[in-house]
Image (cartoon, rainbow, N blue to C red):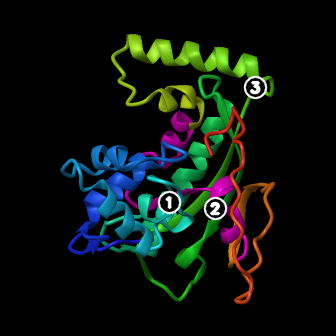
Amino acid sequence: MRIDPKTTIAGLPALQMRLALKRLCFYGQWDASQLEAAAGVAAGTGGSVARALVDAGLAHRIGTGVWAITQAGKRVSSATAAQRVTRATAEKALREFMERVDDVNRRKEFLGKVVAAVLFGSMLSPEVERLSDVDVAVEIAPKLSDGSRLREANERRVQLLASQGHRFRTFFEMQFHWYYETFGYLKGGSRVIALADLRAEGGLILAVPHRVMFGNPTCKPQPPASPQARPHRRRVKPDPDCPF
């Protein structure tokens, strides 16, 4: 997905809102003050910005003064603002990404592993010569199946990085560093790779044309919603070892 850096999203400059959504993705849910901090807007304006995000379909209200990012919001948070690239450049970026997948699964310092990697979007259309980005979704799981051992290993990794000067923004970021370090390495700072989380968005991604590049996704395609059906929302207690 590509966004135009000259446009606005929910009333804010596109790049500013993309960064805010990226920061808010660290939270399962957030309030107006957290939105203000993430977006860098004035105190007291978070409620109106949140309502604008809801109107744009990028967030949904889950309680009084509490919101969460939608799947569309997550896509915007990982969107690129880079200029279109040639197919040759895109193919090179994809090859380098697959090399990083192998690195993650092979190297012991990464506590997360790639279970599946799926390519989707315009890269699958051979007639498109210049692409906005390469859309890839990954499913990441911990290498340690025992929750206690995973938390201990994650804490040791966090302490090591902190001693080396790494700064963690939130407790949530520290608690799930095993996931974020793996995801960040896979992204590789590439402006071409638009990386999505398959566990969070897989139902939608697997319902459209896609190609499994690695492994076997554990999620299933999500059928289109019936126009007559009313959405039913319920809060689900998150897995303590999963950031989503």
Q: Which residue is labeled 1 in the image?
A: 74
Q: Position of residue 32 (x, y in %)?
A: 36, 50
On screen, residue 113 above or below 116:
above
Do tag 3 and tag 1 residues touch (Cβ < 8 Å)?
Answer: no
Q: Secondary structure at mark 3?
A: loop
Q: Position of residue 93 (x, y in %)?
A: 48, 58
Q: Residue at x 76, y 25 (%)?
A: 144
Name of the residue lying farthest toward the front:
64
Q: Residue at x 34, y 72 (%)?
A: 3
**Which is more N-terminal, label 1 or label 2?**
1
Residue 32 horizontal side relative to residue 186, left or right: left
Q: Residue at x 54, y 52 (%)?
A: 97
C-alpha span from label 3 to label 1: 27 Å
Q: Secondary structure at mark 2?
A: helix
**Which is more N-terminal, label 2 or label 3?**
3
Q: Secondary structure at mark 1?
A: helix
CA neighbours of label 2 inside 10 A, class few (<14), some (14 to 19), many (20+): many
CA neighbours of label 1 inside 10 A, class few (<14), some (14 to 19), many (20+): many
- The three-letter code of the residue at mark 1 reads Lys
**Which is more N-terminal, label 1 or label 3?**
1
Q: Nearer the viewer, residue 57 or 228?
A: 228
Q: Which residue is labeled 2 in the image?
A: 201
Q: Which mark is residue 144?
A: 3
Q: Is 23 contained in the magenta span? A: no
Q: Position of residue 238 (x, y in %)?
A: 69, 41
- The three-letter code of the residue at mark 3 reads Leu
C-alpha span from label 2 to label 1: 9 Å
Do tag 2 and tag 1 residues touch (Cβ < 8 Å)?
Answer: yes
Quarter that holds the N terminus: bottom left
Residue 198 horizontal side relative to residue 14, left or right: right
Magenta segment range? 180-207
Q: Which mark is residue 14?
A: none
